[in-house]
Amino acid sequence: MRIGVLFAAIALSVSACSEQEPQTESSTLTILQTGRLRGNIYPLEVQRGTAPLQYHPILAGYVKQTREEVEAAGGQVLLVDLGDSLTGSFGSYVTASQNVVAFFNALDYDAIVLGNLDADVSPTVLEQLDMPVANPFIKADQQPATKATAVRVQLHTENLPVELIANFYADRDPAEFPERFPVSFGGHQHVQPARDYKALLGQAFIKPEGTFRLFSWMKFESPKDAPAAYLANLRELGVDVVLAHRVYSSKQREVWSKEDPYIAWSPPVAQNILRDNRGFVLSRLDLRRDPDGWKVLNHELVPMVANLAEPDSTIEEVLAPLAPAINEADEVVIELEQSLDRQAILERYMQALAQFPEVDAVLYSSESIRGEWSRGPLRTSRVFDSLPWSSKVVTIQMDRTQWDEVIDSQAFATLTKPAIPEAGPIRIATSEFFARILSKQVALNLETMTTLTPKAEFMVLNDHLKTTPAEASISEEGNDGVGR
């Protein structure tokens, strides 16, 4: 059904209800939510092969069209992003997230939420955003983990006071999934997810009369049975609607239908299924306020397809100035004579880390390599896509017992130099990102972590490829090999 027709049907429905049940106060509200854009906002002028297919002009056009339709009918539109959007692409790396900042500002988002993959975003970047930024992570002193953010933010709306509260993983203990919770955030160590909202919000815990309160639930895993106690806490908090940020793998795709129970929860949960981790499926929720509260009129997932809306060309005027820097940075690294699979890429990355003379061994997650390289010219953006993190390369120290525990687990890829010590600390090269993940699984003292190079880990591999034949094997480098 076309969106214009859909909203007209909603408007007729609301009108019919109003005739049957006259209300002294009523309004309609449409919430549009994006999430996990992962920096995938590129000027259309970037060279072919640098960026995946771009949907943002259609998204911008749909937002513009929806605002015009809803506001003409006397309603209001909220546009929010639920996190993991500022970083993650070669374009956001080159532009220091200015591509996504420009996009958010140009579309006049009402608020954004930070996700766990936004942990390294600079406060300077956040200060350039024209909308409030909600953050679900706090420091030991209960203050937000990043400057210029808050657990609860007030949106700059005219007709309806709106608040947004940020959450990561409901009320789960980080010990349940230690690899999913960030250790550091905004440059601060030992952060924790917000949990005790009553204490964190203080007097603001009590919702002002007439205020609409949103709850952003990141890592919503669609439980089979409604979590009654947690939903009761949300109602006590005064939450009117839950915005769900869900991530699924291609092996476990789950699409909600109109019969799914989450929209009937109290408070109701809006849909948000993410496709291919590109984030270009938008969630829409239409609501009406009456004396009994807010009622859901419509909820749907809106894929950004070509005939959805007229693409908004003005967004390209904003992004175009970023194209030259991205094009210049995306150089041809090497000509590959044969395609390389993930294991081959992993081997070359570990070779690159093994070049540092200060290390005895290399340790990395074999699951962290993304995608493969095709035969022909290999560009820097493709190297980034294989290692989509921009953390620096570091050394950590383990004793022999810890090292043996890692080896026995067979969960990680390892490469050892011939002179690995039998006693004393073993100096291991890895990325800072992976070191922090590993520290939760092996009792590591991260105070001993030192920086080998401030270069991003993908750039270490990038530079290594320029000077090392792509077909060289680890055995030819004189190492013991890669184990898994």
Image (spheres, rainbow, N blue to C red):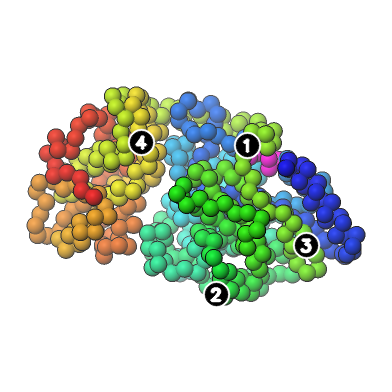
Judge depth for marks 3 and 2 and give the one in front.
3
The residue that label 4 is drawn on is 372
Q: Secondary structure at mark 2?
A: helix
Residue 60 is a magenta residue: yes
Task: Give the class, few, some or many, for how many residues have Cα within 10 Å of label 3's Cα (few <14, many ≥20).
Answer: some
Whether pointer 1 and pointer 3 mark residues with C-beta atoms closer than 8 Å, the reply is: no
What kind of residue is marked 1?
Answer: Val
What kind of residue is marked 3?
Answer: Arg
The quadrant the N terminus occupies is top right
Residue 131 appearing in the image: no
The residue that label 1 is drawn on is 305
Q: Is residue 454 left or right of residue 3?
A: left
Q: Is residue 450 left or right of residue 106?
A: left
* Dot placed on the residue nearer the N-terminal end, 3 or 4: 3
* Dot placed on the residue nearer the N-terminal end, 3 or 2: 2
Judge depth for marks 3 and 4 and give the one in front.
4
Q: Residue at x 49, y 34 (%)?
A: 52
What kind of residue is marked 2?
Answer: Ala
Residue 369 location in percent, x, y? Answer: 34, 43
The residue that label 3 is drawn on is 289
Q: Which residues are magenta?
A: 59-64
Disc 3 to disc 2, C-alpha distance: 29 Å
* Dot placed on the residue nearer the N-terminal end, 1 or 2: 2
Q: Residue at x 14, y 38 (%)?
A: 475
Q: Residue at x 15, y 60 (%)?
A: 400
The residue that label 2 is drawn on is 199
Task: Give the class, few, some or many, for how many residues have Cα within 10 Å of label 1's Cα (few <14, many ≥20).
Answer: few
Residue 152 appearing in the image: yes
What kind of residue is marked 4?
Answer: Glu
Q: Secondary structure at mark 3?
A: strand
